[in-house]
Image (tube, helix red, strand yellow):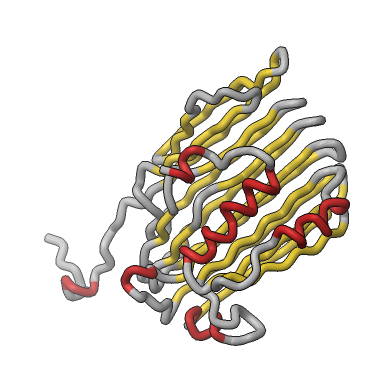
Amino acid sequence: MFVSALPFDSVPALRQRAIGRVSFAAAAFNGQTRPMRIEESGSMRIRLPRTEGAGLDAVLVNTAGGIACGDRFAVEIEALTDASVTIATPAAEKVYRSDGPVSNLSVKLTAGAGGRLDWLPQETILFDNARLDRQLEATVPEDARLTLLEAVVFGREARAERIMDGLFIDRWRIRRGSRLVYADTLRLAGPIADLLQKPSVGNGARALATLIHVAPDAEARLESVRGSLPSGNGCDSAASAWNGLLAVRFCAVTIGALRAAICPFLLTFRGEPLPRVWLS
């Protein structure tokens, strides 16, 4: 007979963690973008609602209902030559508290010659004690167009939640042609709510967003973008351009203020409606 040497309440619980992967590719046929490859496993799914334009809208769905401690997800999206693809999510992604393990989300985006790829998920909400390591890699040729938007909210606003302890690592790497044109890593660890109060970090913001646009005319759009950025109303924003890309940062005191700034900006910037799931 086997007898455990450990007290019952000291034996760590065995958890069934969520693991999901989606690999999706689309191609252009006679001026219309059509799906070429769909691979799904675990809790990740991709859905393709009907659209009226020539491009293709895709919706990423996490059937696990959020991200918990130790979950692992991988997303690969490819817009082949002359294809136009927009990726969105049906709702905010929630990252729940963890008792130690770090969750991982990896995103790989690739555009072909003359292609267009828009990565527009809704915001990620981190709970107190959440631990997330996220990586985003994108590769585009010189004549392709890539627009990335990621927003993150620290704590549930409805509960007046503050992140007293947590971990958020966000790594972005973008290559244009054969060159690395953008490399950025954000790492917040420990009392994130207190860190965001510092003027050099968040100046009191609890909702942040970054937009990166890579295109042949990206740098030429800088002045018009600066003229269209919102001012006041609880959200600060700024734009800069270099290396064939345009970068816009948003810092807001609430998610409501952030969305009130981002939604009209995206409408003007993209010149077309937001993904339908953003409005549901």
Quadrant of the rendered structure where residue 139 is? top right
The residue at the point 86 percent across, 53 percent down is 219
Q: Residue furthest left?
A: 1
Relative height, residue 251 to residue 74 (above, below): below
Residue 98: where, in percent of width, then height?
37, 67
Quadrant of the rendered structure where residue 240 is? bottom right
In the displayed structure image, the side of residue 136 where residue 131 appears, left or right: left
Relative height, residue 60 to residue 51 (above, below): below
Residue 13: where, in percent of width, then height?
26, 63
In the displayed structure image, the side of residue 208 where residue 28 appears, left or right: right
In the displayed structure image, the side of residue 177 where residue 9 appears, left or right: left
72 or 30: nearer the eye?
30
- Quadrant for the C terminus, please: top left
The residue at the point 85 percent across, 36 percent down is 143
Q: Residue 100: in sight, yes or no?
A: no
Please count the marks in the image: 0
Relative height, residue 260 to residue 158 (above, below): above
Q: Residue 15: in sight, yes or no?
A: yes
229 or 59: nearer the eye?
229
Residue 224: where, in percent of width, then height?
80, 55
79 or 137: nearer the eye?
79
The residue at the point 64 percent across, 54 percent down is 265
- Quadrant for the N terminus, please: bottom left
The residue at the point 67 percent across, 18 percent down is 32
Residue 161: where, in percent of width, then height?
36, 75
Quadrant of the rendered structure where residue 223 is? bottom right
